[in-house]
Image (tube, rainbow, N blue to C red):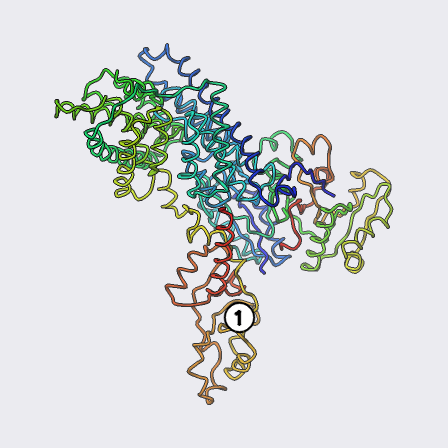
Amino acid sequence: MRKTIFWRYPARLSFFRMDDRLLLISIGVIVGLFSGLAAVGLNRSLIFMLEGLYHLRHLWWAFLLPAAGAMASSIFLEKIMKEGAGHGIPEVIYSVSRYGGLLRFRSSFSRLISSCLTIGSGGSAGPEAPVVMSGAAIGSTIARFFYLNDRQRTTLVGCGTAGAIAGIFNAPLTGLIFTMEIILGEWSMVNIIPIAVAAVAGAEISRILQGNSIAFESSGFHITGVDLFASLGLAVVAAFASILLTRGLRRMHGVSVKVKVPMWVKAAIGGAAVGVLGFFVPEVLGEGYHSIHDMIQGVFKGGIGIAALAFFAKIFATSLTLGWGGSGGIFAPCLVIGSFAGLAFHRVLAFGFPGTPLVNEGCFALLGMAGLISGILQAPLTGIFLILEITGSYEVMLPLIIVSVISTTVTHYFESDSFYHKDLRERGELLRPGTDSRVLADIGIREVIETDCITVPPHMLLREFFHLLKQSTRNYFPVEDPETGQFLGIVELGDVRSYIFNTVMYDTVFVEQIMNSNPDIIHYDDNLADVLETMDARGCFSMPVVSNNRFVGMVSKATLLDKYRDELNVQTSQAF
Amino acid sequence: METTFFHVFRNTPPGREIFMQSLYFCKQTRASIKIYIPEFTKFLMYFDNDVVQVDLDESYLTQPATARSHAMALAVQAGVEPFFIPPMNFTALTLPDISVDFDFMCCPRCISDFSSKFSLGHIGPRVRRIVNAARFPVLIPSSQFKEWKSIMVFFGGSANAVNALNLGLYLSRTTGVPLDLFTQAGELSRSHFIDILKEHDLDEEVEASAREWHFFEKGKFEYNLFEVPHNALAVLGAYGHGLVKEMLFRSTMEMVQSTLTNPLLIAGPNYAVGSR
C-alpha cells in the first residue's frame, strides 16, 4: 500500500478541517518568506550586474550591452528553461482564473535570471513582474507539495505575489492590495488574512537583509488647493501616457511578431535599439530608479524639453525591450515615465503660470507615478498605496487619490482592460471570480450530461414512436442508425405535435421524415458558456452531446442552471 | 460514456510506429482517438495537483504540412476514425494547454528529455510526471508496432497492482483478449494473493477471466520476465516515484520497462478505476 506521509497532507488534519485559515496563514508565512527572498535575490543580483557593467558604460560599444543582455535572456528563457514568452503576470492571472493557481516550478526562478540579464545590461524593464511570477510559482509549488485544493492553492499564489511585491518595494500594503486587485480580482476574508501575513513576511525578510529603507524618500510637501486643482490636469496627462505606453507595447509586439527571425535575434535587435537610444538619453536604460530619486528630490537637472524627451524615449525604450523579447515587467518603467510626466507637467505649469504657488516639482513626479501605475493597471488602490509606501509621503494623499482615480477612469474610457488583462480578455481567458464565465468554466460537459435518453431508429413508424412516447418523460429523442450507431438527428416533442391527432399518418410516417437531421450539437470539449449562449440564441432547452459521430447524452438548460447554482454556492461560500 | 485515447502525433517513421500502436489499442478497445499535431515544441497539461510541461523535441514538428494527412491515412488504414484536437487554451503565446480529459494516453518512454540521449531504457522524468499525476493510464509503446494477443497484468498485491488488475480485466472484457497474471511472490504464498483478490471482490472474476497465473516463488524477477509472451500487452501499476528514487532503489515498473520490449500500460497512483 502507498504510505501516506501525514505532514504532506496538513489539510487532512482534523484541526484544519473545520477552518483552514490557520493552515493558510502558517504556510503563507513560509511562502511570503521565500518570495521575499526571491525579491531580495533579484535586487542584489541587479545591483551586482549594474555595478559590474558600470565601468563599461562610457565605451563606444556600450550600446551593445542591452542587446547582449536581452539576447542572453531570451536564449536562457526559450532554449534552456523552455518557458513560453510573456511578461509573467498575465500567466499568473490566467492560472488563477482557470487552473486554481497551478504554476510550473521552473517559473519560480527562470524569470528572475532572465530579467536580471535584461535589466542589468540596460534593458528598459522592471524587476517586479518577474519577482511576482517567481513568488506566485513558489506559492503554487508549496501548495502542490502539501496537496492543497484549488482554493487554498490560489490563496498561496496570492501569498507569493504579495510577499514578492512587499519584498521588492518594502511595501506590504501594496503587496496585499496588488494581489487582491490585479491577481485574484476578489476581496474575500479567507484570502486577505493569509495574504496580509505573507506580505508582512516578505517585507520583513527584505528589511532584515537590506535594511528598512524607503525607496524614494521625499522631503515633505505642503499641498494647497492649487495643487489639487493642478492634479486634475496631471491625471489626464498620466492617463494618456498610460494609453500611449499600453498601445506602444502592444504595437511593438505586433511588429516583432511579423519579423521572421529567431526570438533571441529579435531580443538582440530590440536591445541594440535601446542601447542606441540610451546613448543619447541615458535615463531610459535599466529600471531607471536613479532618475526617479532625482526627480522626487527636485534635483533633476534637465529642463522641460529634456523631461519630455526622456518621457517619450522611456516609452519607446520599454516598448522595444519588452515588445521584442526582453524579459521584465512594466512597473518600474511606469514609475519612471510617470515621474517624467509629472515633472514635465509641473515645469509647463510653472513656465505658463509663473506666479502660481505650486508645490515642489518632486511632488508632481510622485503624483505622475501614481497616475501612470493606476492608469496602466487600472488599479487605483495599488497606485495610491504603492506611492505612499515607497515615498513615505502621506501628506500627498488627497492629490494622490485624485490623480489615481481620474487616471484610471480616463484610461478605462479608451482601454477597457488593464495592460495585464487585455490579452487574456481578447483570448476569452479572463475569468474573474463571481462571473458567469468563471462559474461555467468550472463545470465540465460530463458533469451535466444526461444519459437516460431513449434512442430511436430512423425507420420507426410514428405509431411505434407514440407508443414509446407514452413511456418516456423526455421531450427529445435522438435518432441513431441501428447498424453503425451513428447519430442521425433528433426528434423533439414539438416536431410530432401536428401528427398526434392525425391517426391516418401513424402508419405512414417514419421518424426519419420528421426528425431534425441538422441540430446544434455539443462536443465534450465545448465551453458551457458557449453552449448556454447557443441555447439562448436558438431558443432551445436541450442539446445533444455527440462524440465520434455517436450520441452520448443530452445537456438541458435546467440541469445546467442547477449545476451553475451549485457551483456558484461553492464559489461564494468559500469567500468568507 | 465514450472511451477516448490521446496521442501526440510525430510525423516521422518512429512516430508512425508509435501511432500505429495507439491506433491498434483504439481499435481493440473501441476507443476514439484524439490526435494532437503540435505546432510548438512544448505544451502544458494541467492535472488536479500538478502542471506538466511536455517539452517535445524538434522531430515532433517535422513536415507539419503533411502531418495531418499522414495521420489520417494511417488511421483510415487501421479502421479508426481520427479526431484532431486543437489546443484548449494558451498559457502564453507559444505555450498551449492540452486537455487532460481522456481515458488513455500514449507516451513514448522519453518524450524529449535529456535522459533519452544517455540512458535509453529509462522512462524520462516528464513521462513519470504524467504517470504520477494523471487519472488515466499511460500506454508506453514498444519501439516497433506489434499486435498484442494477450494481456499480462503484473500483480504484486499492492493497491496500485489491484488498480492494474482492474484495468487488465476491463481491457480483457472489452477486447476479448485473454488475460494472464504475473506474480513474483517471493516468500509470500499464493493464498496471500488470493486473500487480496477476495478483499477486493476480484477472486471470482479473476478465476473466470484469467487464462494463466504465472506465479513465481523462486528465481530472480528479471529472469522470470522471460515468461511474458513477446506479443502481450503488459499492464502494471506504478507508485509514481521520480527518476532518481527509482534509479536508486529500483522498482517493479523500472525493472519491467527496462527488460521487456512489450508495450506497457501503466496505471499511476492517481488512476481511479471508476473514472473510466
- State the image coordinates of residue B35 (x, y, percent, origin top left): 52, 50
Relative to residue B211, is residue A128 depicted above or below?
Answer: above
Q: Going by the image, does A333 lie left or right of A110?
A: left
Residue A308 is at least partly visible in this image: no
- State the image coordinates of residue B128 (x, y, percent, origin top left): 63, 39
* Residue appearing at x 69%, y 53% in the figure: B167
- State the image coordinates of residue A499 (x, y, percent, origin top left): 44, 84
Residue that badge 1 annotates: A480
Image quadrant for the N terminus of chain A?
top right
**Pointer 1 local density, CA inside 10 Å: few below 14, some 14–19, many at least 20:** many
The amino acid type of the residue labelled 1 equals: Glu
Q: Going by the image, does B232 lie left or right of A373?
A: right
Who is closer to the viewer here, A33 or B141? A33
Q: Secondary structure at mark 1?
A: strand
The chain letter for the residue carrying disc 1 is: A
* Residue appearing at x 47%, y 61% in the figure: A561
Relative to residue A261, is residue A540 depicted above or below?
Answer: below
- State the image coordinates of residue A196 (x, y, percent, origin top left): 48, 34
